[in-house]
């Protein structure tokens, strides 16, 4: 039997992990609604793309690239965000995008001082809205990656990987 390489993306390793994230979204649904009014559609999409760049969910990358284009984010800006570079982004959004990247890299456990700086920069309510968007896209990313992980396992490693994944393993 051929051994497969480990799956290189973050995914839900247990149902309890998913349920904890889903429960957070349910408990904080007011924050999610506030995010729709406190943050522009382009800003929300930039945040989602920044998290997706770290978690590398191919489904979210595709969907949120299309949505970002529809709300006015340029192709060049999207490409840079997916490359984890924020040089084309509006300067007032750069701190939140850097925080989003840090937040995703730490698996939703950011350094408390980073969270404090986010609150100082944007205010507590807006920082809460930003974090709600990050949590929401994380759930989407991990669900997409979990689907790919299942494909990977069921196919003996032949399915579920992207070209980038194959370069990493």
Image (cartoon, rainbow, N blue to C red):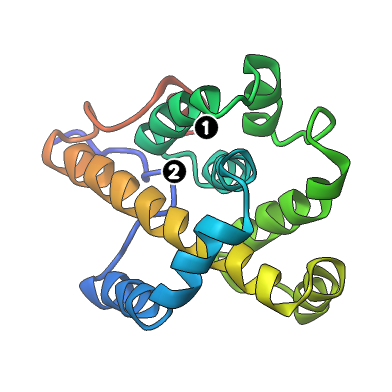
Relative to 86, say whether 123 is above or below. below
Quadrant (top left/top right/bottom left/bottom right) for the N terminus? top left
- Is 16 placed left or right of 56 in the picture? left
| Residue 67 pos. (x, y %) | 46, 30
Relative to 7, say whether 111 is above or below. below
| Residue 86 pos. (x, y %) | 79, 36
Q: Residue furthest top?
A: 75
- Is 147 placed left or right of 68 in the picture? left
Q: Residue at x 22, y 45 (%)?
A: 147
Q: Residue at x 49, y 24 (%)?
A: 70
Q: Residues within 10 Å of mark 2 (few under 14, many from 20)?
A: some
Q: Residues within 10 Å of mark 1 (few under 14, many from 20)?
A: few
- Is 18 placed left or right of 40 in the picture? left
Q: Nearer the viewer, residue 4 or 91?
A: 91
| Residue 132 pos. (x, y %) | 52, 67
Q: Nearer the viewer, residue 72 or 11?
A: 72
Q: Residue 134: which quarter of the image?
A: bottom right
1 and 2 marks in contact (CB < 8 Å): yes
Q: Residue at x 44, y 24 (%)?
A: 66
Relative to 50, say whether 37 is above or below. below
Relative to 66, say whether 97 is above or below. below
Tell how many labels: 2
Is residue 168 something that shows in the picture? yes
**First-in-chain label (1 vs 2):** 2
Q: Nearer the viewer, residue 168 or 35?
A: 35
| Residue 120 pos. (x, y %) | 86, 74
Residue identified by numbered label 1: 168
Residue identified by numbered label 2: 8
Marks 1/2: CA distance?
Answer: 7 Å
Q: Secondary structure under badge 2? A: loop
């Amino acid at each position: 039997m051929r051994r497969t390489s480990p799956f290189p993306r973050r995914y839900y390793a247990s149902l309890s992990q998913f349920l904890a994230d889903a429960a957070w979204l349910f408990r904080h649904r007011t924050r999610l609604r506030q995010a729709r009014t406190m943050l522009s559609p382009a800003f929300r999409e930039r945040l989602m793309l920044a998290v997706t760049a770290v978690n590398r969910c191919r489904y979210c990358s595709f969907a949120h690239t299309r949505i970002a284009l529809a709300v006015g984010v340029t192709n060049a800006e999207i490409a840079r965000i997916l490359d984890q570079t924020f040089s084309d982004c509006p300067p007032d959004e750069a701190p939140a995008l850097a925080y989003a990247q840090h937040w995703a890299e730490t698996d939703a456990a950011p350094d408390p001082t980073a969270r404090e700086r986010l609150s100082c920069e944007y205010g507590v309510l807006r920082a809460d809205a930003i974090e709600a968007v990050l949590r929401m896209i994380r759930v989407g990313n991990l669900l997409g990656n979990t689907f790919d992980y299942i494909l990977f396992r069921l196919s003996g490693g032949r399915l579920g990987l992207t070209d980038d994944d194959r370069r990493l393993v």
